[in-house]
Amino acid sequence: MKNSKLMILLRGIIMENPVLILVLGTCPTLAVTTSLKSAFYMGIAATAVLVCSNAVISALRNIIPDTVRIPCYIVIIASFVTVVQMLLEAHLPEAYEMLGVYLALIVVNCIILGRAEMYARKNNVINSILDGIGMGLGFLLALMLMALIREVLGAGSFWGYSIPFLENYKISVLAQAPGGFLVFGILIAVMNKLTEKRGGVKRKSFSCDGCPSAHLCNKTSCNELTELAANDGEGEVKADD
């Protein structure tokens, strides 16, 4: 049992890291990783919302009607984001100003909604909290790693403090959008290589299990949709002939 709980906690940090393995939450990842401070504040805020929303959604999983579960999840997540915003504005105005609009956009962060749909609605409260902590820490560590590279090499500073011997050797592009994509891609490649050697998660199919939008297409899998599109294309070619 202890090993099972530990695996739930550690899964989001390495084997299913939401940023570097599942490639979720890329918008805040690229936007706030120009400095370690902003990356840290974003990671902590998102983790708090993720843990709290997972716990509430898991507790209410047998009460929330299946047909309106996504709107209910969004309302719950938005409520916790509002609380976090108010706390930061009151007690950490520097962090509130630093994160700006990206703090409010935690509401639509696909990591949080994805864990609600994929995990919290299917598991008990304790496991959902552990899953939220693990995924939140994985998100935080990925942000911090990207920010460390971009701030130190791109801005020649650490946590806002200038590093004298790097002032004349800054790689300015790393602090800009193209540099963010470059560092992001390199870290994803490295993480995929590491997890591949350790038997990392491999995508076996494009099934609709756990997809938040599955109800919109009557749970028709992506493979079936691809086959239908291919058949339609062949029919059009024949008709033209």
Image (cartoon, rainbow, N blue to C red):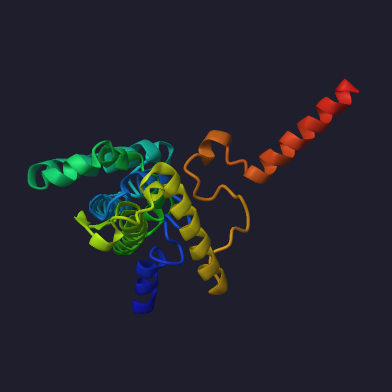
Q: How many marks?
A: 0
Q: Quadrant of the N terminus?
A: bottom left
Is 218 left or right of 184, judged from the image as shown? right
**Quadrant where the C terminus is found in the figure:** top right
Which x, y percent locates residue 123? 38, 59
Q: Nearer the viewer, residue 111 or 32?
A: 32
Q: Nearer the viewer, residue 75 or 37?
A: 37
Q: Nearer the viewer, residue 91 or 204?
A: 91
Residue 87 seen: no
Residue that sits furthest to the right in the current view: 241
Q: Position of residue 110 (x, y in %)?
A: 40, 45
**Which residue occupies the extreme top position in the image?**
240
Q: Is residue 16 left or right of residue 151?
A: right
- Say above or below: 194 vs 204: below
Residue 174 is at least partly visible in this image: yes
Which residue does the image show at 59% across and 58% down from the upper left? 203
Above or below: residue 152 compared with residue 3: above
The residue shown at (33%, 50%) is: 33
Residue 120's image quarter? bottom left
Residue positioned 31% across, 46% down in the render: 32
User: In the image as oriented, which residue stretches furthest toward the front?
Assistant: 168
Q: Position of residue 187 (x, y in %)?
A: 46, 59
Q: Residue furthest left?
A: 90
Q: Residue at x 53, y 60 (%)?
A: 189
Question: In the rendered image, which quarter is residue 18 located in?
Answer: bottom left
x and y, in percent, of residue 135 in the image: 36, 59
